[in-house]
Amino acid sequence: MTAVQHAWIVFLLIGLVAGFLASLVVGGGGLISCLVSGVIGAFVGGFLFHALGISLGIQNALVVEIIHATVGAIIVVLLARLIAWG
């Protein structure tokens, strides 16, 4: 397995975990919806934490990425629900 393939697998797993955690907070969905919301949330959360200059002070990069992606996934799901209701 190449480094690029490994990176993609880790990215997708982080997205899946983040989507699952977000579904626990804001309400469920299936495997695919967890994966999609987690992957999109990873981008949103990473952007927001960086743009706002928020540092969690955690040394483990994997944990930080999961937290960023989970917060982003929660935001994505809530925004999607607001758009669907509007």
Image (cartoon, helix red, strand yellow):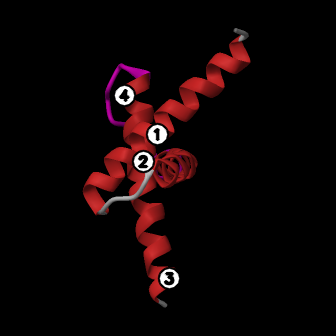
**Residue holding disc 1:** 16
User: Neighbour class for label 1 at 10 Å: few (<14), some, many (≥20)?
Assistant: many
The three-letter amino acid code for the residue at tag 2 is Gly
Q: Which of the two discs, 1 and 4, sits closer to the camera?
A: 1
- The answer to whether mark 2 and mark 1 are in CB contact below 8 A is yes
Q: Which of the two discs, 4 and 2, sits closer to the camera?
A: 2
As measured in the structure, the alpha-carbon distance from the residue carrying label 1 to the one carrying label 3 is 23 Å
Which of marks 2 and 4 precedes in the sequence?
Answer: 2
**Residue holding disc 2:** 19
Q: Where residue 71 appears, x then y in whole percent? A: 38, 51
As measured in the structure, the alpha-carbon distance from the residue carrying label 2 to the one carrying label 1 is 5 Å
Mark number displayed over residue 63: 4
The three-letter amino acid code for the residue at tag 1 is Leu
**Residue holding disc 3:** 84
Q: Which residues are magenta?
A: 50-61
Which of marks 4 and 1 precedes in the sequence?
Answer: 1
User: Neighbour class for label 3 at 10 Å: few (<14), some, many (≥20)?
Assistant: few
Which of marks 3 and 1 precedes in the sequence?
Answer: 1
Residue 59 belongs to magenta span: yes
As measured in the structure, the alpha-carbon distance from the residue carrying label 4 to the one carrying label 2 is 14 Å
Residue at the location (32% across, 26% down)?
58
